[in-house]
Amino acid sequence: MGENMSKDTTCKLGIDIGSTTVKIAVLDASDNLLFADYQRHYANIRETLHDLLQQAYEKLGNMTTAPMITGSGGLTLAKHLGIPFVQEVISVASALEHTAPQTDVAIELGGEDAKIIYFEGGNVEQRMNGICAGGTGSFIDQMASLIQTDACGLNEYAKNYQEIYPIAARCGVFAKTDIQPLINEGATKEDLSASIFQAVVNQTISGLACGKPIRGHVAFLGGPLHFLSELRTAFIRTLKLDEEHTILPDHSHLFAAIGSALNYKKIHSCR
């Protein structure tokens, strides 16, 4: 994604500090994506950000960056570094406006958070989970460990499911009490995996939408929905979306970082 930059080139740098990962995106003056990547930070945010920036400089060469920070863990770092901060929902909305302006609803799952964002007549409404990580990436990891695999293993198993079992996704403790008897009764890993993904879908729709319809053009964002094809399929199946109304953007797991970079131009053009 991009060639070495000249020494006087200024690029927009978007930084997204999430609950489990750090993501960065580098855009040129025409908003073309030159570099984007992510790493798990394991609570070492500064070191992880340094590693990602080093990778960007090695890929693109010398450049001047105009940074913006977003994300659930970004405000403190932004204040410490004196870098402008933009709310995550604004970042995501900016990225969608840039790449998929027809979006009516965005569903975004992260490591420990889940969001539904409605776009209605120029207004943006965000609904987000509370302190519980039920129905998120960390929930999927917990459930995968119960059947001795990981999230990617769940995805492979779920491709060949035959039956969906009811599993509670509002809390890992409740979900475990649903899954363990199924394991004891001989339920297949294929069926358990698909049931776990369906539980995430049900929790997101019932817990966040709270009866408000999810319809029109729906975008799927965030790491779990980017990497787990069967989780996306479960959402699409449940929401009865056709191909025209299903939006799967490139780099959907890096959207907040891309959107924060796009906001650098918006903020500074107003000064």
Image (cartoon, rainbow, N blue to C red):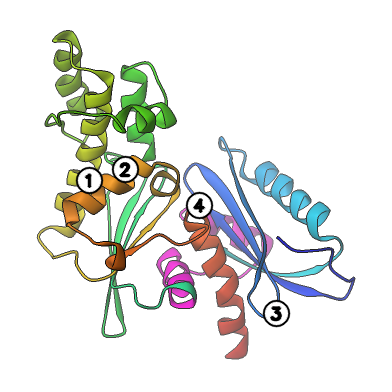
Whether the residues at callouts 1 and 2 have beta carbons within 8 Å, the answer is yes
In the rendered image, residue 228, in percent from the top left (x then y), is placed at: 39, 41
Q: Nearer the viewer, mark 3 or mark 4?
A: 3
Picture quarter with the C terminus: bottom right
Label whose residue precedes the other's in the sequence (3 or 4):
3
- Checking the image for residue 14, the label placed there is none
Query: Helix or strand or loop: what does disc 4 sit on?
Result: loop
Tell me if mark 3 has few (under 14), some (14-19) or many (20+) residues whose alpha carbon lies within 10 angstroms of its own.
few
With 79 as the anchor, is 65 left or right in this view?
A: right
Identified at 18% across, 16% down, the residue is 187
Instruction: Find out whether residue 199 is within the magenta segment.
Output: no
**Which numbered circle lies on residue 201?**
1
Q: Amino acid at mark 4?
A: Gly
Q: Earlier in the sequence, mark 4 or mark 1?
A: 4
Instruction: Name the residue rendered at 40%, 67% in the picture.
Output: 89
Q: Dot 4 corresponds to which residue?
A: 73
Query: As shown in the figure, which amino acid type bears the numbered disc 1?
Result: Val
- Where disc 3 sits, the SS reads loop
In whole angstroms, how far apart are the C-alphas of marks 2 and 4? 26 Å
Which residues make up the magenta segment? 72-98
Residue drawn at 17 percent across, 10 percent down: 186
